[in-house]
Image: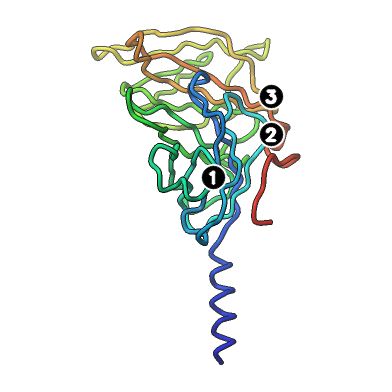
Amino acid sequence: MRYLLILLLTVSAHAQTRQVSLRLLAFDGMNIPPESFAFDPAAPPGTAGVKAPVKGYLNHEVTKVILSGSKVVFAKTANPEDLKKPEMVLADVNLPRAGTRFMLIFLPKATGEVGYQVMPLDDSVKDFPLGSYRIINLSRFPVKLNLQDKSFEYKAGDSKVIENPPVGADKHSAMYAFSMIDGKWARIGANTWPHPGKKRSVQMFFDNPDTKRTELRGFRDISPPVPGQQQVATSAGE
């Protein structure tokens, strides 16, 4: 009976873990940590971190991590003892309880603060289909995006996907970006966007601390048609 109980507890503990595939993107390409390692804070003592590079672009490479809960901690080294040193910890984030594929956007903290804030996004093709744009509003102001004759509005903190964006005969969209200033829409940018095709694109509105203006920054996903499934950068627990 005692052995049966131990077996049941072991099976139960194993069933509660999940393997997640992570892609780490630095919002600020000039502020990328030289090295980053992912830790499960609920892992057995002494468990080393998994190499998890933060990049300034999106490609097919993912980091696989086995988690007992939802929290992931990132540190400058793989040494678990460094998690006790605040200056060695880069960031931590709680992932959604559902899902196994996530894009983590590393955002700089306020001036003078150490580390990063991390925004987790569902990176599955179901939630973020091929041929679509994911629009994120990091600005404290409402923003608006016009593509051809369609308008898309976003409140502060919104993250939404535009599937099959409207295009003209040349497969491009006339893009106009706006920010709400003093109760009125003010144009902050204009460009021509190609249809993503079988790729995806992440576009982020943000408030530039230097110019004091709301700007738009984009990252094209250069991964294969089904992101992350052709090749794995690093893995653990397999």
Q: Nearer the viewer, residue 44 or 193?
A: 44
Instruction: Kindly identify which numbered label has been placed on residue 38.
Output: 1
Q: Residue at x 67, y 14 (%)?
A: 171
- The label nearer to you, 3 versus 2, is 2
Amino acid at the residue labelled 3: Gly
Q: Position of residue 132 (x, y in %)?
A: 59, 28
The quadrant of the image that shows the N terminus is bottom right
Q: Earlier in the sequence, mark 3 or mark 2?
A: 2
In the displayed structure, 175 sits above or below 128; it is above
- The label nearer to you, 2 versus 1, is 1
Image side of residue 139 versus residue 129, left or right:
left
Q: Nearer the viewer, residue 39 or 107?
A: 39
Image side of residue 160 versus residue 52, left or right:
left
Q: Nearer the viewer, residue 56 or 35?
A: 35
Q: Position of residue 183 (x, y in %)?
A: 25, 14
For disc 2, the marked residue is 60
The image quadrant of residue 194 is top right
- Whether residues under marks 2 and 1 lie with C-beta atoms below 8 angstroms apart, the answer is no
For disc 3, the marked residue is 197
Q: Residue furthest right?
A: 230
Mark 2: few/some/many CA within 10 Å (<14, 14-19, 20+): some
In the displayed structure, 198 sits above or below 185; it is below
Mark 1: few/some/many CA within 10 Å (<14, 14-19, 20+): many
- The label nearer to you, 1 versus 3, is 1
Q: Earlier in the sequence, mark 1 or mark 3?
A: 1
Amino acid at the residue labelled 2: His
Whole-angstrom CA distance, mark 3 to mark 2, is: 16 Å
